[in-house]
Image (spheres, rainbow, N blue to C red):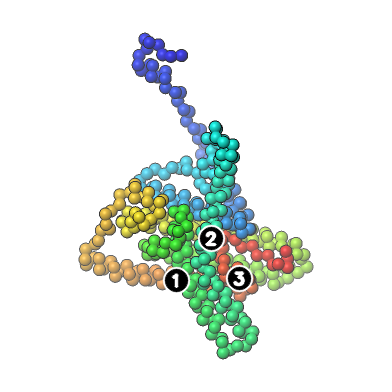
């Protein structure tokens, strides 16, 4: 029904306007709290179960790194002076964050395109979690492999030499052990920030950008010290957990127990430690590293220490929206000399403290090996570093 020829232009325009869209319903605060708590509990339980298996642990690692990316992009948005989009969905386990109505946008398309769209909506996050987790885990494994292999060789070489009474070669094991520990310490100064860079930028090549990772470590020595201390502290807890299991196994606790009962006890033990240690510890360490990188990278771009052609596509968005200085301001001559000397001494002290903490972290591997004789997995894989998985069942019990 058209508008009357005698109606005013305002009335005609009002008749042509579509009806107002109703505002979305907002749940009361208590219900929102219950819904959020339920989602957190669901993710916590699924992450705990994921730590029982290597493939599922890769999914949990990928989900964690995608959460790091989400938090970093939100931090960048806030520092750019914009309101963060709180409606942006957190990383999911299976469904794509853009799924919405699964069938929306598929009308009029070919059958195979509709099927592909539905699969992307149903399994989009699953694929993203697997891809992110596997790539970062592989890169982390490659960096820690030299130090872990040499430490493993030093351990077996030392014991083999002691059993054969080869006193003239007694220095081989300790010497190789020192070399392996040094390489492992160097790797651990690099890996946490490199993991955060790859997670935030979404680029595999970003993990191997040594200069950018080094710049972040130099710019945030205090927070990197805290991060190294967190690794050492959580590593000590893990060492106690592994050693306690060995002490229980060597006692009378398993005497008269069947293999099925022992396996059931081990599964419950690993589930407990995964729920209250591995899952929260892995999340905490990766979120701390992500915050360090997000802060330092933003400051480096705004201060023009990083150029636009040197960063990834996602980091280039900061250049597009932030006020980037033409060149970093330099303090006056005398002040510059004093600040340089003070910062050099301070950085040297913090770096020495960081290396000391990482030395303790490496020694924890040797101490744990004294209490529980494990295969190469103890040297080549740490739950807090590469993959959040620890579920060792002796072969004779399987």
Q: What residue do we see at 56% from left, 86% from top?
A: 170
Which of the two discs, 1 and 2, labels the residue nearer the N terminus? 2
On screen, residue 340 versus residue 197, left or right, reads: left
How far apart are the two marked residues, 1 and 2, measured between alpha carbons? 23 Å
Disc 1 versus disc 2: nearer the observer: 2
Residue 370 percent coordinates (x, y): 61, 75
Who is closer to the viewer here, 336 or 202? 202
Q: Residues within 10 Å of mark 2 (few under 14, many from 20)?
A: some
On screen, residue 45 versus residue 97, left or right, reads: right
The answer to whether mark 3 and mark 1 are in CB contact below 8 A is no
Q: Please say whether residue 257 is visible from this viewpoint.
A: yes
Q: For mark 3, what is the residue?
A: 376
Which of the two discs, 3 and 1, labels the residue nearer the N terminus? 1
Q: Secondary structure at mark 3?
A: loop
Q: Secondary structure at mark 1?
A: helix
Q: For mark 1, what is the residue?
A: 355
Q: Which picture quadrant has residue 133?
A: bottom right
| Residue 137: image tag | 2
Q: What residue do we see at 56% from left, 43% from top?
A: 120
Q: Please say whether residue 222 is visible from this viewpoint.
A: no
How far apart are the two marked residues, 3 and 1, measured between alpha carbons? 24 Å
């Amino acid at each position: 029904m058209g508008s009357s020829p005698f109606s005013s232009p305002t009335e005609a325009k009002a008749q042509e306007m579509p009806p107002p869209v109703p505002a979305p319903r907002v749940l009361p605060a208590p219900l929102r709290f219950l819904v959020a708590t339920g989602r957190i509990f669901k993710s916590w339980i699924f992450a705990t179960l994921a730590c029982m298996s290597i493939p599922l642990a890769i999914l949990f690692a990928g989900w964690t790194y995608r959460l790091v990316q989400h938090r970093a992009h939100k931090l960048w948005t806030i520092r750019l002076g914009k309101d963060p989009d709180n409606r942006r969905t957190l990383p999911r386990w299976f469904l794509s964050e853009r799924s919405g109505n699964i069938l929306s946008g598929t009308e009029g398309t070919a059958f195979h395109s509709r099927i592909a769209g539905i699969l992307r909506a149903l399994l989009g996050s699953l694929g993203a979690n697997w891809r992110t987790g596997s790539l970062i885990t592989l890169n982390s494994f490659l960096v820690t492999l030299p130090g872990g292999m040499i430490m493993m060789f030093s351990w077996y070489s030392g014991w083999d030499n002691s059993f054969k009474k080869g006193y003239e070669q007694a220095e081989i094991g300790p010497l190789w052990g020192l070399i392996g520990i040094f390489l492992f310490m160097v790797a651990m100064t690099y890996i946490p920030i490199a993991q955060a860079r790859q997670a935030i930028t979404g680029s595999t090549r970003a993990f191997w950008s040594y200069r950018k990772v080094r710049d972040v470590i130099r710019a945030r020595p205090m927070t990197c010290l805290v991060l190294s201390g967190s690794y050492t502290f959580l590593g000590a807890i893990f060492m106690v957990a592994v050693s306690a299991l060995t002490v229980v196994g060597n006692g009378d606790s398993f005497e008269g127990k069947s293999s099925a009962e022992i396996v059931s006890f081990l599964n419950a033990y690993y589930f407990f430690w995964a729920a209250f240690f591995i899952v929260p510890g892995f999340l905490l360490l990766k979120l701390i590293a992500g915050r360090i990188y997000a802060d330092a990278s933003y400051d480096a771009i705004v201060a023009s220490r990083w150029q636009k052609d040197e960063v990834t596509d996602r980091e280039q968005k900061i250049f597009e929206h932030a006020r980037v200085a033409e060149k970093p301001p330099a303090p006056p001559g005398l002040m510059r000399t004093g600040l340089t000397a003070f910062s050099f001494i301070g950085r040297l002290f913090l770096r020495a403290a960081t290396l000391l903490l990482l030395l303790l972290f490496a020694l924890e591997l040797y101490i744990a090996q004294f209490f529980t004789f494990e295969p190469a997995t103890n040297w080549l894989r740490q739950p807090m570093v590469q993959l959040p998985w620890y579920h060792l069942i002796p072969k004779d019990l399987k």
